[in-house]
Structures are given as structure tokens and as C-alpha cells.
Image: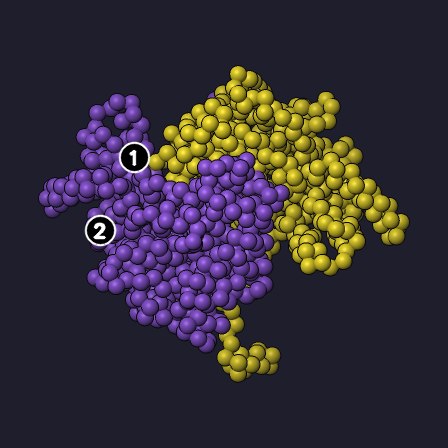
Chain colours: A purple, B yellow
Amino acid sequence: MALRAGDHSQAAMTGVKEKVLTLDTMNSSIRRVEYAVRGPIVLRALELEQELRQGVKKPFTEVIRANIGDAQAMGQKPITFLRQVLALCAHPDLLNSPNFPEDAKRRAEHILRACGGHSLGAYSISSGIQLIREDVARYIQQRDGGISADPDNIFLSTGASNAIVTVLKLLVAGEGRTRSGVLIPIPQYPLYSAALAELNAVQVDYYLDEERVWALDVAELRRALRQAREHCRPCALCVINPGNPTGQVQTRECIEAVIRFAFEERLFLLADEVYQDNVYAEGSQFHSFKKVLTEMGSPYAEQQELASFHSVSKGYMGECGFRGGYVEVVNMDPAVQQQMRKLMSVRLCPPVPGQVLLDVVVSPPAPSDPSFAQFQAPTRPSQELGLAPDMFFCMSLLEETGICVVPGSGFGQREGTYHFRMTILPPMEKLRPLLEKLSQFHAKFTQEYS
Amino acid sequence: MALRAGDHSQAAMTGVKEKVLTLDTMNSSIRRVEYAVRGPIVLRALELEQELRQGVKKPFTEVIRANIGDAQAMGQKPITFLRQVLALCAHPDLLNSPNFPEDAKRRAEHILRACGGHSLGAYSISSGIQLIREDVARYIQQRDGGISADPDNIFLSTGASNAIVTVLKLLVAGEGRTRSGVLIPIPQYPLYSAALAELNAVQVDYYLDEERVWALDVAELRRALRQAREHCRPCALCVINPGNPTGQVQTRECIEAVIRFAFEERLFLLADEVYQDNVYAEGSQFHSFKKVLTEMGSPYAEQQELASFHSVSKGYMGECGFRGGYVEVVNMDPAVQQQMRKLMSVRLCPPVPGQVLLDVVVSPPAPSDPSFAQFQAPTRPSQELGLAPDMFFCMSLLEETGICVVPGSGFGQREGTYHFRMTILPPMEKLRPLLEKLSQFHAKFTQEYS
């Protein structure tokens, strides 16, 4: 009481009112949000870069960012054809230039005709340009061996993140024991935990099996669901395939088992498939949830609700800065789909340049097109790995070597185990010394602290 | 009971389970969201366009969209210099082309140097590229007669909408009688009502004074606040200046009164200033809340919390499709500002092409630059108006004339009054016949239904 009075008189003396918006008064759901990919390690990396620029001496000369799947920041060059089409769309005077291939010009004209006022500067309809959604549908149909896709079930978005949050927003409801629960893998990509915290939904963890290279085990799903039902209302299951941060590619059998589980337990399925073009391990193959679900036939094909996400940020294109992505919904209640359309319309439309890139990605030059050979240029992996210890390890690694990775705690890990997540996007000439430095640091660190 | 049993047996017979996600189970806050700018009138307009393409006979040959501030969709041409810089950034091979002015090339190189991997395809930091935030700060400083702006207080965003929702998200909290209330003008731009519904906050209406050309009256603010305090915890006041949909430009005296009111009543101020370049009426002048607040001196200058929003979608640039915008926060609690930075980081970054456009908008070519004359080309108004009746009027107008406007109910209006909102972006040769048709329709309509 004395303390409060003291506070008040001090405020009166200086004439300073307390802020309206403080940590105490703000939205507590937002305060609970954590986002490791850009957490304290990355903030410190920014400071270190600043210090290096100011000439401060460090045991390294540059910070190497292996914390985020950002291919072009690591020196990967964009695909020329993508950028040609984009430049032509942005500045249509270039359509008269002899320095652009005919197929790039045709594509740009094709896209511009579908834009309001034939300009990238007009809003598109909220779900994205019709022509581009049609091209995405054709791409999905081809990817899935002919299984049809409906452009009206495709919503373009501001990166996959935006689409994922939109679907989660529709799903979460209730209070107390009827609060929505959403099953997410551990380790996960921290967008999920952040979005669930923000939406005040219950995060239900299921652990991937590190012993089996981070495979998904339906028995573990069952355990997580059973426990969750004691305190919330689980309504959705998120699967990340190929795994982020694990890199694990699910087998067809695993996907079938997950679909059967979701159907029996009445869970809406969210399939984060943004790494579908990043499959490297021999014998591995990407199977889309949509394809497997459809091929499983009745009742799954006509009833299991699914949202599948993809992005132009990952894969061989790595065009993160454009924030292009999409979601395809399958078996969604038409009335809910109408609500989703309405919700997206409040933000007007996804950025049109990202929509343009997506169009080129889903319908690349054909073998008969002049740009075909160039488009096929070798691409770099952006696969993700999962290894061992945590925050202290990562901060020490950054301070001593300039290598920026993310502690496993931000993605989730079994209690008592420690990991970090790194991306392997740096070019070969940087990647080799990076791995050598990392290996030396790791040996020294484990010796020092074991 | 009989009905439920019947339902169950029917489900069992057909083997069809009810959907997991239905209107009944979905997030009820989302269901409550309404967004008139893209509501039923606009959906019907889309259908009519489709029917016209299919050769269906109508009393008009095209749909004219006066429902949304989308200049380029209405035929306004983008500013060449903006698009040149964008094309150069998207496809840097063009930097060697003799067909681009030197200042456009210099600007593109300047921006690319500030991008990760010198590419638009890399993520930027979550608050936006540092260089661009510095340019925005310089622009604000110049606009406000030298009052300084700090780049660290500027957050680039995916259009102004995204920034507005982010600030609202921080502000809303509580349940029942402690639920946050946010004062918004009626009529308003429906993003506000939609966002507040989505965030489950209380929308507190204050009415603009139609008799005084939609002026803001502090006595009315006081009335709205007093009534709201009986059932919620009002914490913020939104002001749209120049008004949307009213076009009203607030006087300096009015802004001072609003700031004094917000300070006394402990309300966080949100100033939606996206139409700051659209001031046409003689004697009118735009005053930014930041400038007035600062010039009012102590205690307002150091204490009143404010967020001011701007966009590349409006004004003379009208680049809606790129989704570029920013918010400047003033006197925000540093701990909360850190939370805001974290929240933005979850969505990674605003689209980089929109950031690039914003940079050119805030630092256009100087008089000594080769592109200066071209950049000064005459621009079209995108001012908004407010007139009279509602949904039936708008739907009939659309069906009979192809003119698409929005009923006033979507923006809010005093009970018993009816309005519609139209934008006047169509080019002159369309605008004149549009206004004639509208005037004939209005005469006929009021005669028929009065």
C-alpha cells in the first residue's frame, strides 16, 4: 500500500502518467507468443553485424546466418525467368525490349491481362487472381497424378504463414475445457506455437521419434490426443511434411495412418507441405496428403477435411521476400469456406508480385519454350537438419564464430534433450569452413561442459 | 430428441459424418466479422461481369466499380519512375540497359545494397529494411516541418491494414466488463469493425456530424466514452483523417481537442492518415497528429501514445496491389514496442516489393534528377464522398446500371439515415456518364419509393 502511494506521489511530482499500453495492460495472448527463428540469438547477430561494421574486433569477420531458410540472403541467385516476368509485369514498357525472351513476354502479357486495370498496382480479388488460381489447380492436378483440383478451393496468401494462421483462426473457439486444442509436432516450426498462443488455443504436443530419424508415430498421436481431451477440445492436427526443422519425409504408409487417425478422431487436418520440393535422401519421395487421401477412397476422399499449404519461399525458387503462397482446402464445409473468403477480404488481397511469382513457379517454361534450358539450371538444397544442445550453445557459437543458428527449444524438444536448428543454405565455399568451425566448436564445447 | 436420433440414423445410413468445422463449431468471432467493401454487392458485381462475358443481355455493357479506392483498376496509370526502380530491383541485369534513367538505376542499386543477398527475394528484417525506414523517417520529418522521426519507431507493413490490426491486437484484452473498448468513427472504414469483431473487442461508436460535413465533435466523443465505460474498458481512440468514407479533413483545432481528450481520458490514439495526400477542398490542409501533438508541447508531446498509419495504396501513387505501408509509433512503452517487434517477426517480413515502392514514394526524385519532371505528372483524385440510401438502392443501382457502390450500413450511419459510399476513381470519360446515370437512377428511385 505504501509502495502504491509512493508511486502515485512520484507520478504526481513529475507529472508523468503511466502509459496506457504497458506489459501489464496489453493483450496477454500476444505476450505469451514466442518466435525462436527471430529470437534473442538473431537479435544478438544483428548487433554483432553492426559492431563488425563499426570495426570492433571479433574472432570472426562475418556473421553466417544458418538460422532461417532464406536462400537468397545466403547468396543463391534468383531464377532469371521468374525475375524477367516480374520486371515485365512491373514495367510493361519492357514488353517492347528485344532483350527479353518471347516466352517471358507472353507470360507477362497473360498475367497482366488478368490483373485489374492490367496493372500489378490494382488490388486482386481477395482469394487471388482467378487465372493464377487456375494455374495452381493445374499444377496440383499434375503433381497428384491427375487428381483434380478446383481453383475455387485455392486461396493465394501472403506467404504460407498467412494462410496457416487464417485456417487456424477459423478453427479455434471456446473457453476453459471446451477451448480448441491443436496437435502440433515437436519439434515444430514455431509459427504454430506462436499462432496458437496468439489465438488463445491449446497447443497439444506430439513428439516426433528422434530414434527413427524424427518419424511420426500414430501411437504417439493417440497418446497426445487422449491426454488433451482431459482439458480441452482437440479439433485439428498439424503435420509438417517434409519436416521442419527435421527434414523427415513421411512414407505413404505413415500418411495413410495419419489420415485414418484424423478421420476416426474427427480432426481437421493441416498439412504444411512447403518443403515438398526439398527431398534429397535416396529412396525418399514426397506424397501429398491430398493425393493419398483421395486414393484411399471412401469415406476419406469425400469426407476428411484438409488444408494443404505451399509457398514460393522454399524449394528451388527461394523467393522469400515476395511473400507468395497458397492454401488448397479439401472437403471444407461450403459455408465455412465462405467465411474464410470473407476473412481474407478484410485484408484486401495478397501482394500481387508474390502472386505473379507463384504463377511462374506452378507453370514453368515447357521444353519447347526458349527459357526452358535456363530454368532447369541446377538448384541448391535448402533442407533442414536437426542436431544437439541449446540457447547457451547457440549464443556461444555466435559470439565465437559468427555462425547464427537457432536453439531447439524454440521448435520444441523432449525434456532433457537439446538441439539446435540450422539451415544449410550458405554457398559451398562458405558451407565447408562453416561446418569445420562448427565441428571444432562443438568438440571444444562438449569437452568444456561435460 | 427424436430429431437428433433421426439425424444420427441418417448419418449412419449414408456413412456421412458431420464436418468437423461448421458454422456452429467455428470461431464465432470470425463469423461476426463483416466487411462491406467486398460484401454482397461486390459478389453480385463479379457475377454480373461473368454474365456479361457470357453474352447475357443487361441494361449496361460493363460494371463500373466505384466501391473501392483502387485507382489502377479504374485505369489510372502507374508512375513510370516507381515501376522503373521496381523492374531494376526485380531483374538487376537491367542495370546495364541504356533505356533506364540514371537516377532510377542509382536508386535501385541503393535499395539492393540494403537487401539480404542484394536481392528482393530475401526476407527483410521483420520491421522492414533499415535503409527504407530511415528514408521514411526523413520523409515524416520533412512533412512535419522538421520534427524528428526515429527509424526504430517505424514498422513497415503489408499495407496499412496489417499495421492497424497489429496495433489493435496489442491493445485488446480482458473479458466481460473489463473487455477492451475501442472508439471508432461512424461512418468508418470497415476494417476497424471487422478487426474488432475478430479480436473480440468492444466497438464503441462515435458519430461524425453529417450537418457539419462529417466533422468530428469532441462532445460526441465524450458521450460515447461515458456510455461505453458502463460496460467495457475503453483503451483506444481511432481517428481517420482525412476521413474514409467521408473525405472530411480535420482542422488543427479539432486535432488539438482530440489529443487533449485522449490524454485526459487515457486513450491510446490510432491515427489513420492514409489519405493525407488526398486533400482537395479549398482552404483545407492536412495536419498530422504527430506534428500537432509535438507542437502542443508538454505533457502531450512526451506522453500521449500514438500510432500513425500510411500506405502506398492511396494518394497519387495508388499502388494497392503491392501491399506497402507503415506505422510510426510515438511515446510507446519500449517493452510493448519490443512485443510489437516480436509479433511482426512471426509473419517474417512485409513484402519486399511493397517496401521498395514505399521507399520511392517517400523520397521521390529531386528537381535536379532526370526523372523529376516525369514524376510530377498530373495525378488524379481518389477522394471519397458520402451521400444517401442503402443496400436495396445499391443492389438496384448495380443491376440496372452496372455501377458498383457500397451501402452506408457497411461503414455505419445514424439510425434512420441511409447512405452509400462511392469512390470517384473512374477516368473522366467514364465518370461523367456514370454520374449522369446515377443521378437519373436516384431521381427514379426516390420517386418510385417515396
Using the rendered image of the protein, determine whether residue B45 is visible from the camera's viewpoint: yes
x and y, in percent, of residue B306 in the image? 54, 31
Is A251 in front, or is B335?
A251
- Secondary structure, mark 2, is loop
Is B385 in front, or is B4?
B385
Q: Residue at x 83, y 47 (%)?
A: B441
Q: Is residue A401 left or right of residue B239?
A: left
- Secondary structure, mark 1, is helix
In the drawing, what numbered circle is on residue A45?
A: 1
x and y, in percent, of residue B35 in the image? 63, 49
Amino acid under label 2?
Leu
x and y, in percent, of residue A12 in the image? 50, 25
Amino acid under label 1?
Ala
Q: Residue at x 65, y 47 (%)?
A: B37
Q: Are marks 2 and 1 on the same chain?
A: yes
Q: Residue at x 77, y 51 (%)?
A: B60
Does B339 sit above or below residue A241? above
In the drawing, what numbered circle is on residue A418?
A: none
Is A418 in front, or is B65?
B65
Q: Is residue A97 left or right of residue A143?
A: right
Letter of the chain that mark 2 sits on in the rendering: A
Report the Cα–Cα distance between label 2 and label 1. 21 Å
Q: Is residue A322 left or right of residue B251?
A: left
Letter of the chain that mark 1 sits on in the rendering: A
Q: For mark 2, what is the residue?
A: A387
| Count of numbered tags | 2
Badge 2 density bin: few <14, some 14–19, many ≥20, Cα 10 Å: few
Using the rendered image of the protein, determine whether residue A32 is visible from the camera's viewpoint: no
